[in-house]
Amino acid sequence: MSRLLEKYKKDIIPELQKELNIKNKMAVARLEKIVINIGVGEALQNIKVLDTAKNELGLITGQFPATGRAKKSISSFKLRKDNPIACYVTIRGKRMYEFFDRLVNIVLPRVRDFRGVSPRSFDGRGSYTLGMRDQLVFPEIDYTKVEKSRGMNITIVTSADNDDEARALLTKLGMPFREA
């Protein structure tokens, strides 16, 4: 069992029950999945760029990424429907808790001028989205082999009903929120 999952089950569930006045421990919010997405718009000219992005995302998550395709054609971007333009990974279970633990304790402190993540990035239904500017902050990436810095979106989906429950859960799990 991952270190964070063990901490969640032993310490965080009782704390959240007391804090949010929840009687049943099964009603306490939990992480459901984490989706990491890298948009690669330059794949329209050079498809090999998408392959390097997939390799890097695979190194970061430990799981093979899927290819995202364009949903509709946009002529001003020279984009056709079903062109490959992104790669994404959905992680769940033990791997999700290990990734979240690495994200909070290793990756975010390595971000330059980091003062905490924005507390306003919740979607209203308990999910939190975090944008990273480049992939070099992950220790799995060898910066000598990186051709170009790529950003990514990390969406943390929780079972919380509202943003306040999700914020309480993520705070207990160690997410460093900036003071708003």
Image (cartoon, grey):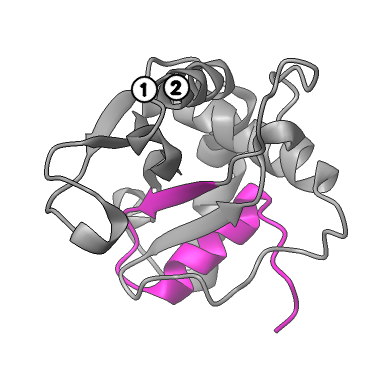
Q: Residue at x 45, y 64 (%)?
A: 166
| Residue 168 falls inside the magenta stretch | yes
Quadrant the C terminus occupies? bottom right
Q: Pointer 1: what residue?
A: 65
- Residue 143 is tagged as none
Circle 2: residue type: Lys
Query: Which quadrant of the structure image shows residue 3?
Result: top right
Considering every residue shown, the one lying at the far bottom of the view is 180
- Residue 54 is tagged as 2
| Secondary structure state at the residue bearing disc 2 | helix
Identify the magenta region: 152-180
Q: Residue at x 57, y 49 (%)?
A: 12
Query: Residue 160, relative to residue 98: is it above or below?
Result: below
Q: Residue at x 37, y 51 (%)?
A: 157
Q: Position of residue 160 (x, y in %)?
A: 34, 62
Query: Which quadrant of the structure image shows residue 24?
Result: bottom left
Circle 1: residue type: Pro
Badge 2 vs badge 1, beta-carbon distance below 8 Å = yes
Query: Residue 159, relative to residue 41: is it above or below?
Result: below
Horizontal relation, residue 151 to residue 40: left or right: right
Front position in the image: 168 or 153: 153
Q: Position of residue 161 (x, y in %)?
A: 29, 68
Which-is-in-front pick, marks 2 and 1? 2
